[in-house]
Image: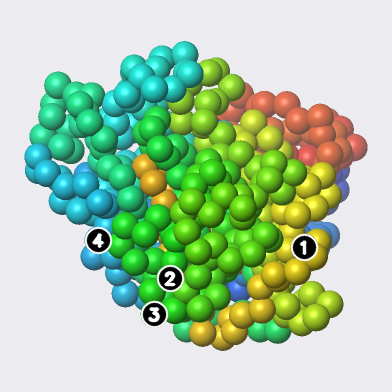
Amino acid sequence: MLTKFREVLVGAWLHGKVEGMIEKRPPKNDPGIRNKFSSSATLSAACMITIATMAPPTYGELLVYEPFDYTPDEILTDKGGALGTVGTWFSNDFIAGDGKTKDWLVHAEGTTSGVGLSGKNPSSEPSGMHRWDGLVDNLATSGGFTGLWGADDWNDPDGPNSGEPGRNLDAHISLDPEVTETFQSGTTTWFSYVAVRGWDRNEETPNLIIGTDPTPNDSRAFSLSNSGDGIGTGGGPPRNNRGHIYPMYFSGGTAQNLLGEITSWKADQVTVPDDSRMDWQELDDDGFFGAVNIVVGKIQWDDDDGGEDIISVARFLETETLNEEAFEAMIAAKPNLSSANWDDNKPDLDQSQFDILNIAGLKFFVDEIRIATTFDAVIGGGAAPPGISVVRNADGTVTVTFEGALQTAPTVNGPWQDVDEQSPYTLKPDQAMQFGRAVSE
């Protein structure tokens, strides 16, 4: 897996003794290792090394992790097995024909989708090919990504597509009952996902909804089936919010936002204003179409003053630092990104029935869907970080075994410098204390 994100594990070697912290996380898609994100580990006592135990950071519990780690170039429908889910995905795309079925397609990470743009965008390459390959600069990724089909997938090897590569997209999968059981009054649930515009006409932010029922096919997240309830985020309805991100929920099957009930796609009176939303970014920093948007949501169950739920939502770009402080700063800058600051029409839902994960919207790619109990878990819980171990030898040297690349620093806070050595690396310590870490290459 190629990723530019760097997870660090810190160890220190010292004249006379070795100190170390080894932080371990469960492998992806392993439901049997829930609630074991962090654990201290010590080197073997047989090495005659004194270990100074350091308390690892609290990462919380990753409840759901869907990296779309399925066979590339196959439909998403009937795929399953991701952490925190049961059964398989159902997916629907409004458009079919020329070898394309009414399903979403899985694409391999590190490859582009093959979608050709229509030229109706202000990018540096308006009539070129979609450039996103499933990788994210500031987020660990694995598996693949899913959404629209590409030109080759439509039996059009000379692409780009002459028409829309897809339109109304709906997909859902069931949550593990153990996940639903965590949605308790007074607790907090975080979610995140990667959302990328898939085509350059009439796109709509993928709405992620945790609820009782799925969206009807072709509804564009206008309603939930069976008068269902749910909570999440996305863009639209109404129509003027298609390219935005803000908190939303469903009550009795009807979409709601801070301004009230949405009874029509043309209900312009409930369009969420600029000071209460974030944009679904269209162009990346280089001016190309298909910027990566990382959507993060925080649900505080029954925690508002009147016992209502609180839903807070923010959007990060891949050039920004992902941390909880930045999330809270975005909410502070636009208070209505949290329902805690709404005057009325707040969500008051029975989350004990929420057993469906649903995505719906128009012309997009989506990836890295996560649900967790903390911000750190929902952002960092997807991929295992590189390992590192330190052993002091009888001759006074130290052997460092590591995955990825090794960096060293005089303090735990840096400055870090690359070490041009392969693992295992044996050295003779020449400083009072030196710290090392392994990073992804």
Query: What residue does disc 1 label?
Result: 342
- Residue at the image position 57 percent from the left and 49 percent from the top: 268
In the rendered structure, are the residues bearing label 2 and label 3 in contact, judged by CB atoms less than 8 Å apart?
Answer: yes
Work out how far the residue at label 2 is from the one at label 4, CA to CA, in angstroms: 20 Å
- Which mark is in front, 3 or 4? 3
The numbered mark, 3 or 4, whose residue comes first in the sequence reads 4
Q: Can you say which quadrant of the picture contains the C terminus?
A: top right
Amino acid at the residue labelled 3: Asn
Amino acid at the residue labelled 1: Trp
Query: What residue does disc 4 label?
Result: 77
Work out how far the residue at label 2 is from the one at label 3, CA to CA, in angstroms: 7 Å
The numbered mark, 1 or 4, whose residue comes first in the sequence reads 4
Q: Neighbour class for label 2 at 10 Å: few (<14), some, many (≥20)?
A: many
The numbered mark, 3 or 1, whose residue comes first in the sequence reads 3
Work out how far the residue at label 3 is from the one at label 4, CA to CA, in angstroms: 22 Å
Q: Can you say which quadrant of the picture contains the N terminus?
A: top left
Work out how far the residue at label 1 is from the one at label 4, CA to CA, in angstroms: 38 Å
Q: Secondary structure at mark 1?
A: loop
Q: Neighbour class for label 1 at 10 Å: few (<14), some, many (≥20)?
A: some
The numbered mark, 2 or 1, whose residue comes first in the sequence reads 2
Amino acid at the residue labelled 2: Leu
Query: What residue does disc 3 label?
Result: 226
Q: Position of residue 424 (x, y in %)?
A: 56, 39
Work out how far the residue at label 3 is from the one at label 1, CA to CA, in angstroms: 27 Å
In the rendered structure, are the residues bearing label 3 and label 4 in contact, judged by CB atoms less than 8 Å apart?
Answer: no
Residue 224 marker: 2
Q: Secondary structure at mark 4?
A: loop
